[in-house]
Image (cartoon, rainbow, N blue to C red):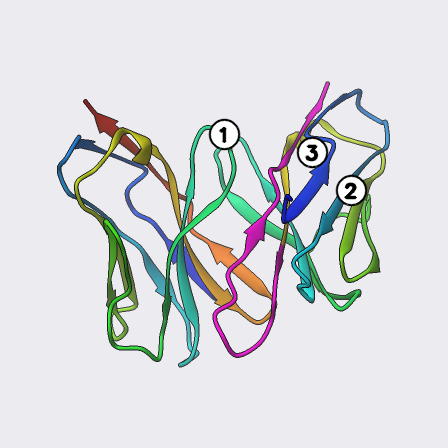
Amino acid sequence: AQTVTQSQPEMSVQEAETVTLSCTYDTSESDYYLFWYKQPPSRQMILVIRQEAYKQQNATENRFSVNFQKAAKSFSLKISDSQLGDAAMYFCAYRITYKYIFGTGTRLKVLA
Amino acid sequence: DTAVSQTPKYLVTQMGNDKSIKCEQNLGHDTMYWYKQDSKKFLKIMFSYNNKELIINETVPNRFSPKSPDKAHLNLHINSLELGDSAVYFCASSQWGFEAGELFFGEGSRLTVL
């Protein structure tokens, strides 16, 4: 069964510091896609970053980057220079045929 | 212009009632979804439709009946509401295919069953 595991229910980071959120997944497929979504208190789901499994290069989007370890089935999100607006729930997701499977989420608190 | 819009945003109703949530996307996507987010924020897929055809039904009770009149619309009707149905329901869409089509979400509909 395909599963996505986020082992950190909650994380805290000081403003301007760096934080890494963990995600592991289980799959038998070789080609797939991984995503990180952010859900602020407004409850809107916002795409942060995506990674294609066939690409070895780690994806980056401004202050957000991933560490994709295909063999280990690990897909962590690094947020650099954390800002107050980064405070939110973060969900890791894995795309398979006609569905996206989400992890249980990590609540990120940013301390001023 | 909202890409994925769902109405209503909030519903409060009594146990046993029936309610509907409507969803429309203007992205030209061919696949639409309903997700349920419970009080612990866990997001679970309920249904996915591709070109109006039901593709996935994740062991959702028969009280939930989705309907897709065309590929831009996916509505959700819930009969005989129960307390456990209280949640946020998200409609979403994506373009299926080789490229990593991201999932676009609506703003969610918070259902409270009293």
Nearest-to-viewer mark from 3 and 1: 1
Amino acid type, residue under disc 3 in the picture: Asp
User: Residue A5's x, y, as percent?
Assistant: 36, 53
B32 to the left or right of A1: right
Amino acid type, residue under disc 2 in the picture: Lys
User: Residue A11's x, y, as percent?
Assistant: 24, 35
User: Which residue matches tag 1?
Assistant: A42
Which residue shows up at 38% across the image and 66% down it?
A26
A84 to the left or right of B53: left
User: Which residue matches tag 2?
Assistant: B22
Give the structural element (helix, strand or loop) at label 1.
loop
Q: Which residues are magenta?
A: B93-114
| Quadrant where the image shows the C terminus of chain B | top right
User: Residue B89's x, y, as percent?
Assistant: 65, 39
User: In the rendered structure, does residue B100 fall within the stretch colored magenta?
Assistant: yes
User: In the rendered structure, does residue B50 fall within the stretch colored magenta?
Assistant: no
Q: CA distance from mark 3 to mark 2?
A: 17 Å
